[in-house]
Image (tube, rainbow, N blue to C red):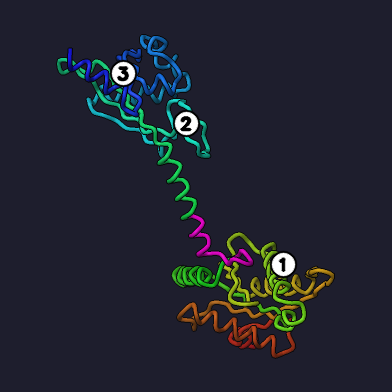
């Protein structure tokens, strides 16, 4: 008798929902936690089917879950990460979450009498705080990972991540003998633009340029800010003809771009270099070097034009 009293005291003081059902899913035990959070007294729950008290329960899934507990005579578990909640119990936390109901960890325990499972004890732990803070932590980590990949100004890949992408694409193209091309371009007279209109104007130009070029590219193309006013595009599965076409479209789009800043309309141009993977390049850095050299050849030749890497020019001459 004393043990029963202690059990009842503990059962009604713990901050965990405890309900026991028989093998016909009728509730036989209903503790204080459930009385408070489900807003139902023991008289309103005990003796009734768990599915009538909690009509939101996924009945077929729930029956299979409890059946496995009985047949295997072992406990089972369902975490908030698997299902945010099984029971629609409102949480009372003064925090903003995606659900009005408490996140739950549920444990299903076989209750035996004479070596035979006659009931199942269901323990419902409020995991709302854990869910909330883990979700927030996950978002922070995602934001940090994003910041590590993305250029803060233009919202395209930063140089570090872009080079990592190039290294992977270079290795893949080498392994499977696939095409790979690289287009690098630099805005002409950008220093003069900064000197004349200020760095805020320069930032606006870089943002507008990135937005204009993004719309020209395929989903598989990898666009990054290489440094300052220099940009680069990795073109997987692309030959010389395709790369030259993309380079010319980039040059043409920038030439047609008009950036409005305060009361000024600023027109731009770009010098563009193109390199394509060949047997001579042993490292991805060789591809960058060839495209970059072609870019500065375009600048030396008068700007606002596309130039091919010298190896490509030699190949065309042949």
- Foreground disc of the pair 3, 1: 3
Please state which of residues 188 and 67 is positioned toward the viewer in this rendering.
188
- Foreground disc of the pair 2, 3: 2
Please state which of residues 5 and 297 is positioned toward the viewer in this rendering.
5
Please state which of residues 68 and 96 is positioned toward the viewer in this rendering.
96
* Left or right position of 30 against 2: right
Seen in the picture, residue 171 relative to 128 is either above or below; the reply is below
Q: Which residues are magenta?
A: 142-156
Q: Is residue 237 visible?
A: no
Q: Residues within 10 Å of mark 2 (few under 14, many from 20)?
A: few
Separation (CA) of disc 3 from disc 1: 64 Å
Residue farthest bottom in this picture = 300
Task: Please provide percent x and percent y for residue 66.
Answer: 32, 23
Q: Earlier in the sequence, mark 2 or mark 3?
A: 3
Seen in the picture, residue 134 relative to 80 is either above or below; the reply is below
Q: Residue at x 67, y 79 (%)?
A: 186
Q: Which mark is residue 20?
A: 3
Q: Earlier in the sequence, mark 3 or mark 1?
A: 3
Task: Please provide percent x and percent y for residue 128.
Answer: 43, 36
Separation (CA) of disc 2 from disc 3: 24 Å
Q: Residues within 10 Å of mark 3 (few under 14, many from 20)?
A: many
Q: Are marks 3 and 1 in contact (CB under 8 Å)?
A: no
Task: Please provide percent x and percent y for residue 303.
Answer: 73, 85
Q: Residue at x 32, y 13 (%)?
A: 28
Seen in the picture, residue 86 relative to 172 is either above or below; the reply is above
Q: Residues within 10 Å of mark 1 (few under 14, many from 20)?
A: some
Q: Which mark is residue 92?
A: 2
Task: Please provide percent x and percent y for residue 81.
Answer: 41, 39
* Left or right position of 69 against 161: left
Q: Which mark is residue 208?
A: 1
């Amino acid at each position: 008798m004393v043990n029963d009293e202690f059990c009842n005291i503990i059962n009604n003081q713990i901050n965990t929902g405890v309900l026991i059902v028989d093998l016909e899913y009728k509730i036989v035990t209903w503790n204080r936690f459930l009385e408070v959070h489900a807003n139902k007294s023991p008289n309103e729950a005990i003796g009734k089917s768990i599915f009538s008290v909690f009509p939101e329960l996924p009945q077929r899934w729930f029956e299979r879950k409890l059946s496995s507990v009985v047949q295997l005579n072992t406990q089972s578990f369902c975490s908030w990460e698997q299902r945010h909640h099984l029971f629609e119990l409102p949480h009372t936390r003064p925090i903003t979450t995606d659900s009005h109901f408490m996140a739950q960890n549920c444990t299903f325990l076989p209750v035996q009498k004479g070596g035979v499972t006659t009931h199942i004890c269901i323990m419902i732990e409020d995991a709302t705080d854990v869910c909330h803070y883990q979700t927030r932590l996950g978002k922070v980590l995602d934001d940090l990972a994003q910041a590590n990949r993305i250029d803060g100004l233009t919202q395209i890949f930063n140089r570090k991540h872009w080079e990592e992408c190039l290294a992977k694409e270079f290795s893949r193209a080498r392994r499977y003998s696939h095409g790979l091309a690289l287009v690098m371009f630099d805005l002409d007279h950008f220093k003069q633009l900064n000197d004349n209109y200020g760095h805020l104007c320069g930032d606006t130009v870089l943002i507008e340029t990135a937005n204009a070029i993004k719309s020209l590219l395929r989903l598989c193309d990898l666009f990054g800010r290489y440094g300052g006013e220099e940009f680069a595009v990795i073109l997987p599965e692309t030959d010389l003809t395709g790369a030259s076409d993309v380079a010319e479209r980039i040059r043409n789009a920038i030439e047609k771009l008009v950036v409005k800043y305060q009361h000024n309309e600023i027109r731009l141009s770009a010098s563009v270099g193109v390199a394509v993977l060949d047997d001579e390049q042993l490292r991805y850095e060789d591809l960058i070097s060839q495209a970059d050299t072609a870019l500065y050849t375009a600048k030396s030749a008068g700007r606002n034009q596309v130039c091919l890497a010298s190896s490509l020019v030699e190949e065309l001459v042949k």
